[in-house]
Each structure stands twice: as C-alpha cells, then as structure tokens.
C-alpha cells in the first residue's frame, strides 16, 4: 500500500497535508496523534471514503483516483476490512448474518458465505454466539464480530479506527491482541488509529500525525479546496 | 443474504411501524376494493335480475317502484291491474311468456308471491330453465308453496313443513297472522343468485282467497289490496318476456295508451336508477377511496423517509462494507414495494372479506345477491395503480439514500 499525498481536507475549517507514507503487506502500523489531527481521515482516504485533493493513494496496486464512486465502494469491499470504535454492527441481524453481509458486499462471494462467516466468528472466539444479535452481546463480543466481519473476506488491508476506544482496558487488550495476531497470521497490513502509546509500541511501526493539521489562514499557500 | 431477505428483516425489526404502515395502505386498498367490487357486483346483480323480464306491467304509478316491487321484491307495488289484462297480454302473439304476481303477505319478512305454475317455466337468456327444484316439487294444491333458497336457509323450513303468512309486505310488530290459512312447503328452489331466492311462491288463488275471506280487500298493501272476487280479480303485476327485446318500447307505449296500467322495462329503470342515484354515491365513495389511497402512499413515503433517516448509520455501514449506492437504494426501494404490496394484498382481502361479511345484510336489505370474492378487472387496474403510486412514493427515499455519502453517517455513535 502506498499513500503519497499533497493535501487533503479533514473538516471544513481544517486542512492538512500528509507526507509520503508506505505500508508493506503484513506490516502493522499505529496511527497516533491528538484528536482532530487527521488520523481517521488517513484511514478514510485508504478506504476510499474520502478523496484526496492532490497526490496519490494506491492500495493493492490500484490508484484510487482512477476509480469512480462505485469503483471505490467495490475497492473498499474487496481490499479493506474496517473496524470502528463503535463497532458499527447492523442491529437487526445476528452475529453470523452481520459477517455474512460483510462478505456479500465485500468479497462478493457466493461460495457458502455463512460457512465462512461462521469460521471467522469461531476464529475470534464467538463460535457459541453465532446467532446472537448485537444487543444480546457484550461490547467486547460486539467488537469481535466487527473484527470477524473485517477478516472474513480476503481484504489485504485492515483499517481499525480506535478499536479499543469503547472497551475497558482488559477487553481492549484482548481485542488488540486478536487484531494484531490475525493480521500477522494472514500477512495483512494493519493500520490502527490509537491514543494508547502502549498499544502503539506493540505494532511494527508508528506513524505520528501530530503536525499535519493546518487551521485555515495559517499557511494559505498550502490550502486547497475540498472535493 | 440477498437484498430481499435483508429488506424483510429490516421490516420485521421495525414491526410496529411496518404494521401501522401496512394497515394504513390496506385501509385505502380495502375501501377501493370494496367500492369497486360493490359497484361491479351491484351492476351485475341488478342487471341480471332486471334482464329476466322484458316488461313489467302494473297499476298506475312510478315505473321504478313497479320494477322494485315486482322484480326485486323490495318496494310496494304502485297499484293493481285487472287479471283480465294479464289474460289479454298472455294471448298477445308478441308475448313469449307471461306470469301474473299477487302480493299481500309475508312470512318473517320474506314476501309471499302469488303466481301460477307456469311461472317456473321461465328461462334465462340462453333459453336454459331459470328455476330448478332442489327438493320437492312445484306447488299442486292451492295452499302449497315453493321456497326460494334463501328463505329455506333463513327460516329452516323444509318440504312438508307448514307455516302461516302474516298480513302486509313487511313484518310489523303484532302483525296479523292468517291462522286459518296454513301454507305447506311443496318444494325448495335451487339458488339463482337473484332476488327470487328471497321469495315464497304461492298460488295466486291462495292470495285471493286469504284476502277475500278476511275482508282485507283495501288494506293489504297501502290501500292496494288484491281483489279476487270473481270477475274483479286483480294482480299486483304481470311479468313479460317478449318474442324479441325490440318490442319493449313499442309495447310500453301501447300498454300505457290502452290500459289503466303502466308498463316498465326493468333494465331501463334500473340503469336510470343507477345513473341517477347509485352512480353519484359510488363516485363520491370512489373519490374518498382515492383520497385514502393518496394518504396511504404519503404514509409509505413518510415511513420510508423516516426509516431512511433512522438508518443513515446502517446505510453508511453497508457502504463501508462495499455496498454500492444502487444496492442500498434498491434495499430501500424493495422495502417500500413490500410495504405497498403487503398493504394492497391485505386491503384486497379486507375489502372482499368485508363484502363477504356484509353480503348477507346487503342481500336482506336490498335483495342484491353478491359474489363477494369475484375480483373485477377494474379493481385489478386500481390495485395496479396503487402499487405504482407506492413505487413512486418509495423512489424518493431510495434516491435520498443513493445520494448520501457514508462518511458523515459513520461518525454517528451507537
């Protein structure tokens, strides 16, 4: 994965620029920095949820600037497994259905998605909660479903936005270990946003976004309009 | 898991809103179905009854009243006419079939219609016998009667049973019972699906005899009691089938000019009645139904719009998983179609179920025999229109979902 960016927007009042950033397959990278510095935006750029104003975002050999909206959606489904701080599970569906839906839109495979979803859930230790709905599970279990959903397909990149942020320290450590171990076992690239230096230290590399933010007006020559 | 099963799951998850929305659509659809089916069925039933006879001849008065009284057994006949008029008409070479009827009494609200045995020789327009005996036989004796199928069902009378007629065409509390003249059931007719099912057919002689003997010559039917004393014998009406329907208007004018009575073409009177009275009522009901349908479609729109707002996060999650915009829009669209389709289907069942439940009361009150589960083509067109309206109402929330960008909605917390 390569990320060569000139400038990108973060919010209407803030602009920032990212330096060249590369992550190899199997590498685990902690994205750190204060709130609002652009950590999540970095993940969103990789996932194709945002477009960069300038520069180049290449994921699994594809320049995202060349993709249309549907192309970005398919890119995200095929190449990025996303894990959010607030789990982002679909309330009406059971654990196995949440993962199967991820496969349906992500890997777009028709080969036994429920079997694969069940395998992924067993891998994260939820083999006995396949048919529980999110509201019947603990927050730790919900985050495990989200991880299972992210790894059920063949996505080479895992994007985790503060995955332990809503969990107690013990559960947070368990979830972190699970995510890190799965990435290492499958040789997937893990980009994880975290505020916890102890967790960041356990990944192969740390990318600090602290100096990326430029409030409007500070350096007008570096600002560009958003797209 | 495909989009259809996902849509069904979302609808089940919001079961209360789903139920209320379906109920709202169903109400509109039921109203449309009931009004259209009722209109179709009443048109069909009225025409079927009216089409049995080419002409009805009776005393001076309202032609519509004459038709209602003699064909539908509803109103009181406007007046009597001499029996000799019937005999003259029967001999007329243009008349293919003629039968007199005499009214005056009822049994538990069902009219006792005095007539002659050849009344049962009446054929339908395909020349097939119109009446068929289900049990027993046509009357032989003066005080034997043949029951319409509905009468037998409602009263429980069977062949061989006896009963007494009550004075008057409608039951009144304390009405005088003709206890000296017991009727005996000789036969029961098959269901015809017409007003004849609600009649008790007796001999004309029995009607004359009851009213002569008890001297109710001028009180039986609003002063138009049936006279039967020898040469002054009367009939309430004469029913005619002509050699050709083309003779209807000619003979109507002729009878009006040459006798004290009037002749009416039943189908014309009923069509006039429908256009003048029933039609505007039906149009008003249809307008109300259309308004209800519009409100129902608006409900679909509001429901899906609100569901879309509530599900912004879910839509964003699906997009983050790789769903393209068309897929999430299709998901919302399918939900709308299911809501509308279910509402229309439930409405169809409710409308016709309601009609089935009401058909007995309608039959008793008006004499119309309905087939409540028949679905006329106009109703199918209306339901198709409702589905189309629902689809259009669904398009807007689906397009709104299509146009949303997921990034902002993903930041919403659980």
Image (cartoon, coloured by chain):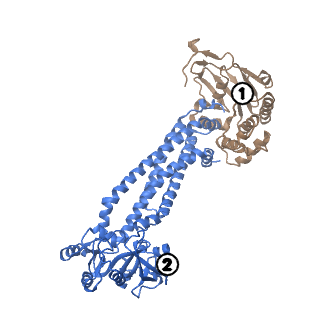
Chain colours: A brown, B blue
Q: Residue B284's spot in the image, x, y percent? A: 37, 53
Q: Residue B239's spot in the image, x, y percent? A: 31, 77
Give the SS element for disc 2: loop
Viewer-side label of 2, 1: 2
Q: Residue furthest bottom?
A: B140
* Residue for point 45% across, 58% down: B34
* Residue for point 60% across, 18% down: A15
Residue B239 in view here = no
Q: Is residue B218 above or below residue B410?
A: below
* Residue for point 65% across, 23% down: A4
Residue A162's disc number: 1
Q: Residue A13's spot in the image, x, y percent? A: 57, 18
Left/right of residue B331 with respect to residue B92 in the rendered view = right
Nearer to me, A167 or B364: B364
Nearer to me, B149 or B156: B156
Q: Residue furthest top?
A: A218
Name the residue that disc number 2 marks: B157
Q: Quadrant of residue B36?
A: bottom left
Nearer to me, A10 or B413: B413
């Amino acid at each position: 994965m390569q990320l060569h960016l000139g400038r990108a927007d973060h919010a209407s009042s803030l602009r920032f620029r990212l330096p060249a950033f590369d992550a190899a397959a199997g590498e685990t990278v902690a994205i750190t920095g204060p709130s609002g510095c652009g950590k999540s935006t970095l993940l969103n750029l990789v996932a194709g949820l945002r477009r960069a104003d300038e520069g180049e975002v290449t994921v699994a050999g594809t320049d995202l600037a060349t993709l249309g909206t549907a192309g970005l959606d398919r890119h995200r489904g095929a190449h990025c497994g996303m894990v959010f701080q607030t789990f982002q599970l679909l309330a009406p569906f059971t654990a196995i259905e949440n993962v199967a839906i991820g496969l349906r839109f992500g890997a777009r495979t028709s080969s036994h998605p429920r079997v694969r979803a069940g395998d992924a859930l067993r891998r994260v230790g939820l083999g006995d909660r396949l048919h529980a709905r999110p509201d019947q599970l603990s927050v730790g279990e919900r985050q495990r479903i989200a991880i299972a959903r992210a790894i059920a397909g063949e996505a080479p990149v895992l994007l985790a936005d503060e995955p332990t942020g809503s969990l107690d320290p013990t559960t947070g450590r368990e979830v972190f270990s699970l995510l890190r171990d799965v990435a290492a076992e499958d040789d997937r690239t893990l980009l994880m946003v975290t505020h916890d230096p102890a967790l960041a230290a356990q990944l192969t590399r740390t990318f600090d976004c602290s100096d990326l933010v430029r409030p409007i007006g500070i350096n007008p020559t570096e600002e560009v309009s958003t797209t | 898991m495909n989009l259809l099963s996902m849509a069904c799951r979302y609808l089940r998850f919001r079961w209360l809103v789903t139920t209320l929305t379906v109920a709202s659509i169903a109400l509109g659809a039921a109203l449309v179905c009931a009004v259209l089916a009722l209109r179709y069925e009443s048109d069909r039933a009225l025409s079927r009854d009216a089409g049995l006879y080419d002409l009805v001849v009776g005393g001076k008065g309202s032609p519509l009243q004459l038709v209602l009284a003699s064909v539908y057994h509803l109103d009181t006949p406007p007046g009597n006419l001499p029996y000799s008029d019937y005999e003259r008409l029967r001999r007329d070479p243009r008349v293919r079939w003629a039968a007199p009827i005499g009214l005056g009494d009822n049994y538990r609200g069902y009219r006792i219609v005095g007539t002659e045995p050849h009344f049962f020789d009446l054929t339908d327009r395909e020349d097939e016998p119109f009446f068929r005996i289900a049990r027993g036989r046509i009357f032989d004796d003066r005080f034997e009667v043949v029951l319409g199928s509905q009468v037998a069902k409602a009263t429980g009378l069977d062949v061989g049973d006896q009963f007494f007629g009550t004075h008057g065409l409608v039951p009144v509390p304390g009405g005088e019972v003709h206890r000296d003249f017991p009727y005996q059931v000789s036969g029961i007719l098959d269901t015809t699906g017409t007003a004849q099912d609600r009649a008790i057919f007796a001999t004309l002689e029995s009607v004359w005899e009851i009213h002569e003997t008890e001297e109710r010559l001028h009180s039986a039917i609003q002063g138009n009691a049936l006279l039967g004393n020898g040469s002054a014998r009367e009939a309430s009406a004469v029913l005619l089938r002509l050699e050709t329907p083309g003779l209807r208007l000619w003979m109507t004018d002729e009878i009006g000019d040459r006798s004290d009575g009037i002749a009416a073409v039943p189908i014309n009177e009923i069509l006039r009645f429908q256009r003048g009275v029933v039609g505007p009522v039906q149009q008003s009901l249809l307008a109300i139904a259309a308004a209800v349908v519009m409100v129902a479609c608006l409900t679909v729109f509001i429901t899906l719009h609100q569901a879309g707002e509530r599900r912004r996060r879910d839509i964003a999650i699906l997009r983050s998983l790789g769903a393209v915009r068309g897929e999430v829009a299709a998901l919302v669209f399918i939900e709308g179609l299911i809501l509308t389709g279910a509402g229309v289907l439930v409405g169809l069942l409710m409308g016709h179920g309601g009609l089935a439940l009401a058909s007995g009361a309608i039959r008793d009150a008006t004499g119309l025999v309905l087939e409540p589960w028949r679905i006329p083509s106009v109703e199918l067109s209306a339901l198709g229109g409702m589905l189309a309206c629902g689809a259009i109402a669904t398009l807007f929330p689906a397009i709104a979902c299509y146009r949303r960008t997921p990034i902002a909605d993903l930041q919403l917390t659980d």
